[in-house]
Image (spheres, helix red, strand yellow):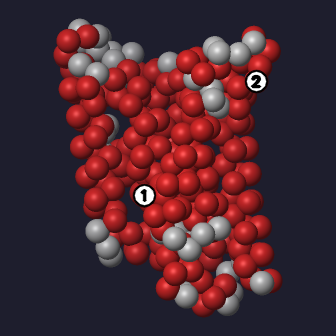
């Protein structure tokens, strides 16, 4: 674990040594506030809840998470530093996990910047903290899955822009297939399968305050799958 912490610390420092972390945090917090108060009309709804925020979270993740992950390995490949990184005493899974934890921590900071919203809303009306806690938990789980997807894509390409676009497309696909708009186009059996595969329906359930073990296992499995895929991609690179 010490090597995982070292890799995570190195990666987190690289975020804050460049404008990336600050631009991401500003974009995440700014977009969250804008959609909460303007796009989804919090004041016009007259309801003291965070639904406007969590309705926007999946789209913010799809747009902003790839911006974090596109550089994780693509930049190392482009600059030729991946060969140096692979010679370090850290194992492949420690490198992947360290980079993942650093990006997940930065995402957590972004979400923490929005905590003033539930506190403020609770002061102006009767507020149910259950869905709020569920929403933040769901956001962290959804973010973990998308970060793992993005890291895998970054590990398979040298082009950061391509990594960004592909990550966004894959994350959008995972979200879209589980939505009622898409799944409702098919038979009941196939629709149920699509909802089970998609991230959208499961996030919506958690954001309502319904914590289902199956949803937690789904996000854990999806995250683990793509982290393992990233490890496999690194090993292919090491053997090449």
Which comes before the other along the chain, label 2 or label 1?
Answer: 1
Label 2, label 1: how far apart the Cα atoms are: 30 Å
Tell me, yes or no, if residue 1 can be seen here.
no
Q: In the displayed structure, would residue 105 be above or below residue 203?
A: below
Left or right, 214 with reference to 175: right
Query: Considering depth in this image, is 182 or 83 the residue closer to the camera?
Result: 182
Q: Residues within 10 Å of mark 2 (few under 14, many from 20)?
A: some
Q: Label 2 belongs to which residue?
A: 193
User: Residue 228 location in percent, x, y?
Assistant: 74, 60
Write the residue at 61% across / 60% down: 153
Q: Quadrant of residue 141?
A: top right
User: Residue 198 location in percent, x, y?
Assistant: 65, 31
Image quadrant occupied by the N terminus: bottom right
Left or right, 66 with reference to 222: left
SS type, badge 1:
helix
Q: In the displayed structure, would residue 107 be above or below residue 203?
A: below
Left or right, 127 with reference to 71: left
Q: Label 1 belongs to which residue?
A: 67
């Amino acid at each position: 674990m010490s090597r995982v912490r070292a890799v995570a610390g190195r990666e987190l420092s690289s975020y804050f040594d460049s404008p990336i972390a600050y631009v991401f945090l500003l974009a995440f917090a700014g977009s969250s506030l804008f959609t909460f108060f303007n796009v989804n009309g919090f004041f016009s709804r007259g309801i003291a809840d965070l639904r406007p925020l969590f309705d926007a979270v999946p789209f913010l993740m799809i747009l902003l998470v790839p911006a974090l992950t596109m550089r994780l390995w693509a930049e190392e490949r482009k600059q030729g530093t991946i060969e140096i990184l692979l010679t370090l005493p850290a194992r492949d899974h420690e490198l992947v996990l360290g980079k993942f934890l650093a990006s997940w921590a930065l995402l957590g900071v972004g979400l923490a910047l929005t905590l003033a919203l539930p506190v403020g809303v609770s002061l102006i009306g009767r507020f149910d903290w259950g869905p709020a806690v569920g929403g933040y938990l769901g956001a962290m789980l959804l973010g973990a899955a998308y970060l793992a997807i993005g890291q895998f894509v970054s590990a398979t390409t040298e082009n950061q822009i391509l990594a960004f676009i592909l990550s966004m497309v894959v994350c959008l696909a995972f979200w879209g297939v589980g939505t009622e708009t898409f799944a409702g186009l098919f038979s009941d059996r196939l629709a149920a399968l699509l909802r089970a595969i998609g991230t959208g329906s499961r996030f919506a359930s958690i954001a309502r305050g319904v914590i289902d073990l199956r949803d937690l296992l789904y996000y854990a499995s999806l995250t683990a799958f793509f982290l393992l895929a990233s490890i496999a991609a690194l090993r292919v690179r090491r053997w090449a």
